[in-house]
Amino acid sequence: MAIKLFDSLTRETRELQPSQPDGLYRFYNCGPTVYAPAHIGNFRTFVINDVIRRLLELDFGKEKVKHVRNLTDVDDKTIKRAREEGRSLAAVTKQWTDKFHADCAALNCLPPHIEPTATGHIREQVDMIDVLMRKGHAYRAPDGSVYFKVTSFESYGRLSRVKERELQLGAALKATAADADEKEDVSDFALWKAHKDEDGDNAWDSPWGRGRPGWHIECSAMSKKHLGETIDLHTGGVDLLFPHHENEIAQSECCNGRTFSRHWYHSEHLLVDGKKMSKSLGNLYTLDDLTAKGFSPMALRYALLMGHPRKQLNFTLDSLHAAESALKTLRSFRATQKPTGGDASVLEPVLAALHDDLNTPAAFGALFSAIHQHAAKVDQASFDRILFALGLKLDEAAAPKAEAPTAVAALAAKRWAAKQAKDFATADALRKELAAAGWSMLDRKDGYSLEPLKK
RNA sequence: GGCGCGGUAGCCAAGUGGUAAGGCCGAGGUCUGCAAAACCUCUAUGCGCCGGUUCAAUUCCGGCCCGCGCCUCCA
């Protein structure tokens, strides 16, 4: 089955195919800036990309996919954070890289094959800027910064269809851009940023003086190093469309003289309470915020996949409740299925939906239809294949069971004794007492357990 | 101002020129003393509003209203 994905550049839904003789599929996914915990909006993008990775593995073979996702570990934000905390840049980025990895693991995202860092690829970036300088696509400003000359690349604006707009916005931009005075044109962007006092020790030598790389160049340099000059798929959130990806195309194609990426895919934003998340609105959640409320990471993953990846998804705590319940249904369904010997075709529509431009909500629809209408034909092996594609783990939720207070435990013991003695009137009365105390008693044949009452 | 996206049941959310997937919640039921769990059934004559095209529109076209995103660091 061919994987079809919308291509932001051609605005068509196109098939994914490896382009080179080695049959390797080259996949680059723009990663996070590691200066704080990633929020659930970031994770929507990473979870969606994880499903792409999984589909590629399923279709092309595990060894035929090379997935690269970078870590931006030097930029204004990381440097600022380090300065505020009086720590080294490396200490700050290490802390948040570790946290990012832990969160990704909790969300069952497959680790990329290579996770390059900007600071680990200064040489490659400098080399690339050097080529751009020599080819006349870049210039050194009086302060020692190097800028990419946007007018030197005629296709600039093709991805974001932004060309005309630039002129109109020129005046406004000029007034706000910090480096407006240094640039020849407001649309030009930094390849190399000359060292400033607030950068501290975070500077490297270059032919143009000490400084640090601009943000966009890292992806161009790192994808070239690890995947080659032309890659098969480049992805990220919509906000990266402009200027980040537009700039990457300009740099890479001017430097290498060939197509940078054959396919572009952008996932839409997660909204919280109908708005884009932001600290100022106070609607920004991290994974930890949600687990602290008792939700499982898997429920978040499920909730993030409930909407079509190319449509804004409005996240609410209610959607997390729905996700937990749906997961529970899938979990108990799987437990009752035979290991093998079913009819795998029953679940084909699920994979078909995923292959059709990553239609995750339709995939869930097909999944539930299948297990309700053809339950007897589904076996665990084919079911697990679907779970793999979606990246769902159905292990029992690891939420630690709350310990009942001794008074409650005593009531429960009393009720169990009454029940054993078939004194149901007393048993029922005690159940009510337990409920009043906020606890629910779950009977089994051979014993019982206590759970805090759900609100 | 420019570019783009969306408005489908209480909530979330697919989808199609021929009469609305699925999840959650809710209701009823089966099964267990009760409860819980599990399973089964039910839940939009309707798809923002107004026109148009058509034998037929939620689906195409036009207008309008509302919401959101990008254009500046941003997944």
Image: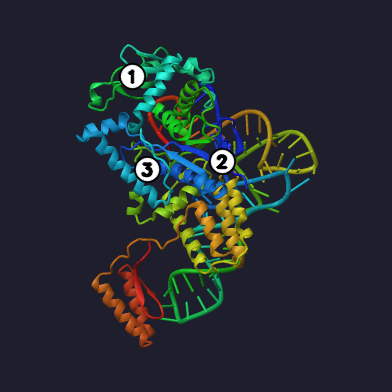
Q: Identify which amino acid the numbered label 1 is placed on.
A: Ala
Q: Which residue lies under the disc numbered 2?
A: A23
Place of residue A389 in the rendered image (x, y in percent of width and height, measured from the top left): 52, 52
Give the spatial CA distance, label 3 vs label 1: 28 Å
Q: Which mark is residue A224?
A: none
Q: Alpha-carbon neighbours of circle 2 within 10 Å: few (<14), some, or many (≥20)?
A: some
Colour style of the rendered protein structure: rainbow
Which residue sits at x=41%, y=16%?
A133
Residue A40 at least partly seen: yes
Of A433 and B61, nearer the camera is B61
Does residue A402 appear to the left or right of A163 in the view shown? left
Give the spatial CA distance, label 1 vs label 2: 45 Å
Identify the subunit bearing mark 2: A
Of A15 and A179, nearer the camera is A15
Q: Earlier in the sequence, mark 3 or mark 2?
A: 2
Q: Earlier in the sequence, mark 3 or mark 1?
A: 3
Residue pushed farthest bottom?
A421
Q: Identify which amino acid the numbered label 3 is placed on.
A: His
Depicted B20 relative to depicted A147: above or below: below
Does residue A59 appear to the left or right of A203 in the view shown? right
**Which quadrant holds residue A443?**
bottom left
Q: Of circles 1 and 2, which is in front? A: 2
Place of residue A97 in the rendered image (x, y in percent of width and height, measured from the top left): 32, 42
Q: Which residue lies under the disc numbered 1?
A: A178
Q: Which residue lies under the disc numbered 3?
A: A39
Q: Secondary structure at mark 3?
A: loop
Depicted A338 relative to depicted A389: above or below: below
Q: Earlier in the sequence, mark 1 or mark 2?
A: 2
